[in-house]
Image (tube, rainbow, N blue to C red):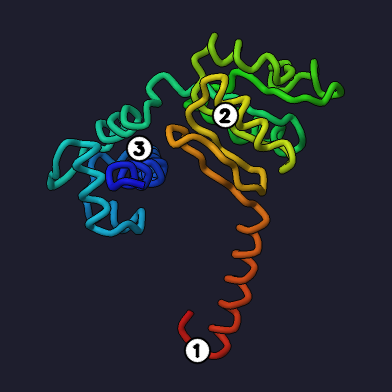
Amino acid sequence: MDARKKLFVSLARRLPVYFSVLNDYIRKDVKSLTTGDLMQQTGFTEEQLNEDLIQICGGLESSYDVVLFREKILKTMSLEDGVSTVIIGAGNLGTALARYNIGSDPYIKLIGIFDIDPRKIGTDILGLEVKHVSRLKEVIKEYNASVAILTVPAMHAQQAAEYAIDSGIKVIYNFAPVKLQVPECTYLHNVDLSLDLRSIIFYATSVGKVIETGDDL
């Protein structure tokens, strides 16, 4: 990965954290914040923050207007009008994401849910009819969708990713526990829930031992 793309990917991972912090400040009616405030709230280093602030705001300032900063974050994330997103896989995970995670986020516009299981085709989730994956391209073209969330079994994930890419998708959020092959121009983010859970369990048990022994983790 070249340095420019690496910098962009790092920023993309930190943007939602900034967005969450800013939303919290707005709810508390805080009008401005400093780099020190951001360091404390995000846990990011001063170097990371300075890099990001230059890209987001065009330069460094002593303090930042919270509402204006949030607008710049939305613009950087291309979320002013929301991002059209599809889910491929209408099983338990796909349905849960649609109903709870995406359905409650005003910046993620879920425009289609797809599957290949005839028992799921035609069913309704959040007012959206589950369609056969063969209709993916027409829906993506109609709504100019750019993000696909894969919640399919591992054995079908590669084929689902290829369907999505051939249909014009540029970003894939993959929940299937398998390594996917995608073109360089496609951004792929893998989420392994079982691995994350094992990491949490390991950390929890390690913390217990550290507390008992007084050692550093």
Residue 214, above or below 181:
below
Structural distance between the alpha carbons of marks 2 and 1: 46 Å
Q: Residue at x 53, y 36 (%)?
A: 182
Q: Residue at x 25, y 39 (%)?
A: 31
Q: Is residue 28 visible?
A: no
Q: Residue at label 3? A: 26
Residue 153 x %, y %? 74, 40
Looking at the rendered structure, the secondary structure element under dot 1 is loop
Q: Is residue 29 left or right of residue 95?
A: left
- Answer with mark 2 or mark 3, whichever residue precedes in sequence: 3
Residue 184 x %, y %? 44, 36
Q: Is residue 33 left or right of residue 200?
A: left
Q: Residue at label 1? A: 214
Asked whether the beta carbons under mark 3 and mark 1 sit within 8 Å of each other, the answer is: no
Amino acid at dot 2 = Ala
Q: Residue at label 2? A: 148
